[in-house]
Image (cartoon, coloured by chain):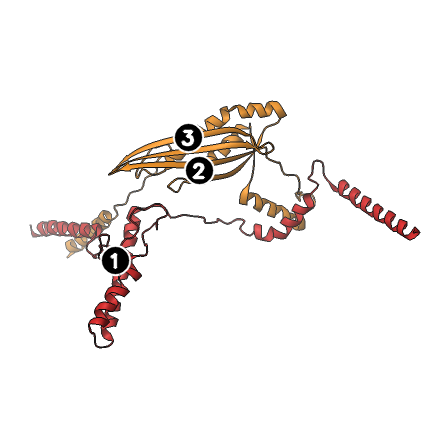
Amino acid sequence: MKYIITLALSTLFCISVNAQNDSVNLLPDQNPNFQRSRAKYMEQSAELTKNQGQTIQDTYKAIDDVQAKKERRELAATRRHERRMARIMSRGYGYGGYYNNGYSYGYNNYGYNNYGYNNYGYNNGYYGNPYPNYGYGYGGYYRPRYWGGPTFGTINAAVGTALLGLTLWHVLKH
Amino acid sequence: MKKIIIACFTITALLSAVSCNRKVTRISEKDQVDLSGRWNNTDSRLTAEEIIKECQSGSWLATHVEKTGKKPVVIVGFVKNKSHEHIEAETFVKDLEKSFINGGQVKLVQGGDKRNEIRGERGDQQDNASQSTMKQFGLEMGADYMLQGDINSIVDSYKSKKVIYYQINLQLTNIQSNEVVWIGDKKITKYVKN
């Protein structure tokens, strides 16, 4: 009995000493639970401070019609190249009969399944693009019309060169 | 021969000058330039101006000071974009935060990832900084109010004409009592003809 009372008293003493220590360690107005936050953030400090002095790139792709058109053209050119390659490869194998060439690459390869249906517009519906399915079904209304013709820059340069050449020829002649 | 060389140089110089047709100029942030009809810097600026004016003239500020004798402490929560466009609310919310700090009537505390980074730095100091410079946990300033917001839009279009309506709502809620003490809004309507 005496042993139990001694044990209980010593436990109470320890608890009160601990409580006193905690209250002594608190600064004025300090949150009494600060140790929990302290332990948590000391553990995570390396992770949370690893980006210090750096710029975190959290960017988004802005709507740019000119850029989107350029990307569509590039994509169309790539796909056209792939189709050509597929056609060449297809011709290279076997007899080249109707079912090998016509059906296989006509429908399955660059038809609905592989090229046309997936959205490759610049916004994929995120910005509510009403016509996201460019190139649907190969040859549809929104088929990319990339034909590799002269751009404004090349036409401009060609016309400029011609005019200057003409002027120079005229000057040098006289 | 000499003439031909000079001519070639001239042609090259002229062509390079003609080819570089992109022109970029700096304009004032207060200039109104509407290109596509989508949300732009002018909308953000108009929203900031309106919201700042409404917030600073609201009765919540005087009421808080009268009740507590202290400046209110505000934390910025999230702004939910429910519109049809990408709209970055931080552009006008930051203007509001800046007006809080510069006006000196409202205190602002950090929230979100930035607060976590600061706490992480404080945690790092517990092991690495000298005792005299180490910052303590449990002494942060608790916010009295949280700023939250919504962005809504309505689009009405017919053929090549379109009317876009934006409504930006910001509100301050008392964190203790859950009472909404202030709501500010900005409504913008645009008529776009393609």
B173 in relation to A79, above or below = above
Q: Secondary structure at mark 3?
A: strand
| Number of residues whose C-alpha sits closer than 10 Å to that of mark 3, classed few (under 14), some (14–19) or many (20 or more) | some
Chain assigned red? A
Residue A137: mark: 1
Q: Residue furthest bottom?
A: A94
* Residue designated by label 2: B91
Along the horizontal axis of the image, is A150 left or right of A114?
left
> Disc 1 residue type?
Gly
In the drawing, what numbered circle is on residue B186?
A: 3
Q: Please name which of the two marks, 1 or 2, marks the residue nearer to the observer.
A: 1
The answer to which of A104 and A127 lies nearer the viewer is A104
| Dot 2 crowding, Cα within 10 Å, few <14, some 14–19, many 20+ | some
Residue type at numbered disc 3: Lys
Q: Which chain is orange?
A: B
Q: Quadrant of the C terminus of chain B?
A: top left
Chain under callout 3: B
Instruction: Report the residue at 48% width, 29% height from top.
Output: B183
